[in-house]
Image (spheres, rainbow, N blue to C red):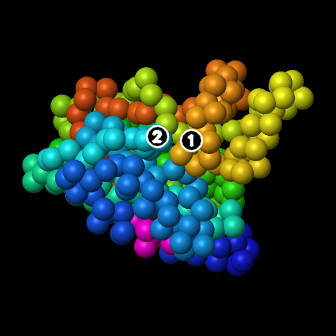
Amino acid sequence: MSEADLEGFRQAGLVARRVRELARKLIREGAPVLGICEEVEEAIRGEGAEPAFPCNVGINEVAAHYTSPPGDSLQIPPRSIVKVDLGVSLDGYIADTAATVSLAPELEPLAEASRIVLRKAIESMRAGVPVYRIGRVVEEAARSLGFKPIRNLTGHEIRRYELHAGLSIPNVAAICPGKLESGHVYAVEPFLTTARGAGEVVSARLSTIFRADPSRAKLRKLGGRERELLAFLIERFRGLPYTPRWIEGFEKLRAVHEKLVRSGRIYSYPVLVEKRGEPVSQAEHTIIVFEDGFEVIT
């Protein structure tokens, strides 16, 4: 990676860090989730960047992939545990970070555990380390604190304009191929649940985040309105995830959008919930790996 690339990722990380701290302050009982999402996304834009994906707000058993749809009336409930996951894209350089806020004293140990586990995982990172070893560190640290990692959620490698690229970073001691490489960027994100939980997420019957994959577009085989919308989504978001909130006049396009989703040309991210309905916490940083260690950029 060139010095210019390193600096690009570092600058994206600085923005993500500042906005994450703002996001934490927005989490309070009764706060509208739509307002949180929009304020976080506007804060990113105010820094001269763009959201790398819609702001995720996961309440209690919701682990990932919930952002407010247009007109959302959901509010932060009392005595809840809330995850805010945000991404910054600065000229295609991406930083991904998340934090958990507990509004109930009995859930604070779960929130704190994800932060502790994240630190231990990062300390194990350097070039040449097999990714399964990071998963083992996460699982052992989580269980030593009395919690379970979510086994089917992972961290991921990041490249310019690619949020999920290359290696996955497991959260359990599973067989997972690959080693960390010097000059590569990774998002590490332990998700934890209680000892009563299944340690697994399942898909809910709701999707609020989507992605138009340029490699699967096949525009020539589409009708006029479908081709026009898909071409717009590819040009506008460059393969990164988006929310219908970001599309002006979406209601008039909803039927066409749904048809593209059904055909597989647009990927929908289902909301993911803990299988037994137990609360989930998350902590995440983006890291650049070097031969002799790491640099946390968020």
Relative to the observer, which residue lies in front, 254 or 86?
A: 254
Relative to the observer, which residue lies in front, 52 or 3?
A: 52
Q: In this view, does 258 lie above or below 163?
A: above
- Give the residue number, with chain letter if any, for mark 2: 69
Q: Is residue 239 above or below residue 278?
A: below
SS under mark 1 = helix
Work out whether mark 2 precedes mark 1 in sequence or the reverse, and give the earlier one.
2
Location of residue 196 in the rendering, given as x and y in whole percent from the top left corner: 18, 31
Which amino acid is tagged 1?
Pro
Which amino acid is tagged 2?
Pro
Name the residue at 68% across, 27% down: 256
Neighbour class for label 1 at 10 Å: few (<14), some, many (≥20)?
some
Which residues lie in the magenta part?
15-20
Location of residue 122 in the rendering, given as x and y in whole percent from the top left corner: 42, 62
Gap between marks 2 and 1 measured at Cα = 7 Å
Neighbour class for label 2 at 10 Å: few (<14), some, many (≥20)?
some
Where on the picture, by quarter, is residue 284?
bottom left
Location of residue 29 in the rendering, given as x and y in whole percent from the top left corner: 19, 53
Q: Is residue 258 above or below residue 19?
A: above
- Give the residue number, with chain letter if any, for mark 1: 244
- Image quadrant holding the N terminus, namely bottom right
Dominant secondary-structure state across the stretch colored magenta: helix
Name the residue at 69% across, 67% down: 91
Residue 16 part of the magenta-drawn span: yes
Determine if residue 174 is in view. Answer: no
Residue 121 part of the magenta-drawn span: no
Relative to the observer, which residue lies in front, 166 or 211?
A: 211
Location of residue 6 in the rendering, given as x and y in whole percent from the top left corner: 65, 74
Name the residue at 25% across, 47% down: 76
Determine if residue 235 is in view. Answer: yes
SS under mark 2 = loop
Marks 2 and 1 close (CB-CB < 8 Å) = yes
